[in-house]
Image: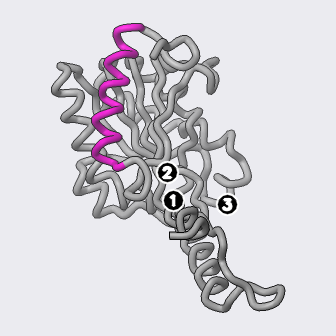
Amino acid sequence: MNLLNKLQSSTPARIGVSRCGTRPLTGEMLKLRLDHASAVDSVYGEVSGETLDEMGWFSVDTCAEHKDMYLKRPDLGRRLRPESEKELLARCRRSPQVQIVVSDGLSANSIEANIRDIYPALLDSLRLRNIEWGTTFFLRGGRVGCMDHIGELLEPECLVMLIGERPGLVTDQSLSAYMCYKPMKGKTDSDRMVVSNIHKGGTPPMEAGAHIGAMIQSMLRQRSSGIHFVM
C-alpha cells in the first residue's frame, strides 16, 4: 500500500481525489453535490412523529418559530416558548438526578440514525450506577444554551442534551451529548462537557451511551462540570 492509499484509508475526508485539468472528475463532483444535498436536507428535516411516538416522548418548542428563524436567530433557540414552559412544569418530574433532553438541533437525521442505539445504552448505564433520571422529552429547534432555561425550570442535578450537530460533507448523522451540572442562567460553554462525533463512522452510539453514563456519575460525585471537572 502506497502512502496515498494509507492516507485515504485513514480518513473519510476527500484527499487525493483526481482531476481532469483544473476540474474534479465528474464522479467526484456528483458525490460532492450529493453529500451537500444530504447536509441541507438534514438541517431542514424534521424528526418524525413516528419516532417520537416509538420513544414515548412528548415535544416542546423554542422561540424559533420556523427553521429559517432558527438559523438566523440562534438566541431564539436558547429560550422556550411560554406554553412550553408550562407543559414542562406540568408533565416533567422536578429535581431529578439527571434530566435527559433530545433535540434536533442542526441535524434531524442524526436523531433518526442514532437515538435507538444511544438512548437505551444511556439508560442502561445510568441504571447500572443507580442513578435516577427524570421525564425525557423532545425539544424542537433547540440550541445547547437552552439547557440553562430548562435547568431553571426543572432543577436537575445534571442535565444531558442529545442534539444533532451541524452536518458536513462527510456525514449528516453526527450527534453530540452536552452535559452540565446544575444548569441555570449565567452558565457558559466552559461549564459544560461534551461527547461529540457520535455516529456509526465515529464514536459508536452504544459506546457513547455507556460512556456518558460514566461521565454523569463522576459529575455527580464531584458536583461540577466543564473546566472545574477533574478527569
SS at mark 2 in the image? strand
Q: Magenta segment, which residues?
A: 204-222
User: Does the magenta segment cover residue 176?
Assistant: no
Mark 3 neighbour class, 10 Å CA radius: few under 14, some 14 to 19, many 20 or more: few
SS at mark 3 in the image? helix
Could you tell me what secondary structure mostly forms the magenta stretch?
A: helix
Quadrant of the image occupied by residue 32: bottom right
Mark found first going from the N terminus, 3 or 1: 1
- Percent across and percent down for residue 117 are 27, 51
- Percent across and percent down for residue 139 are 45, 45
Quadrant of the image occupied by residue 16: bottom right
> Disc 3 marks which amino acid?
Asp
Q: Name the residue under label 1.
A: 10
> Disc 1 marks which amino acid?
Ser
* Residue at 28% in and 33% down: 135
* Nearest the eye: 42 or 128: 128
* Residue at 55% in and 11% down: 228
Q: Mark 2 points at which residue?
A: 164
> In the rendered image, is residue 142 in sight?
yes
Which one is closest to the eye, mark 2 or mark 1?
Answer: 1
> Left of 122 or right of it: where is 173?
right
Q: Name the residue under label 3.
A: 68
- Percent across and percent down for residue 68 are 67, 60
> Disc 2 marks which amino acid?
Gly
Quadrant of the image occupied by residue 145: top right
* Nearest the eye: 197 or 14: 14
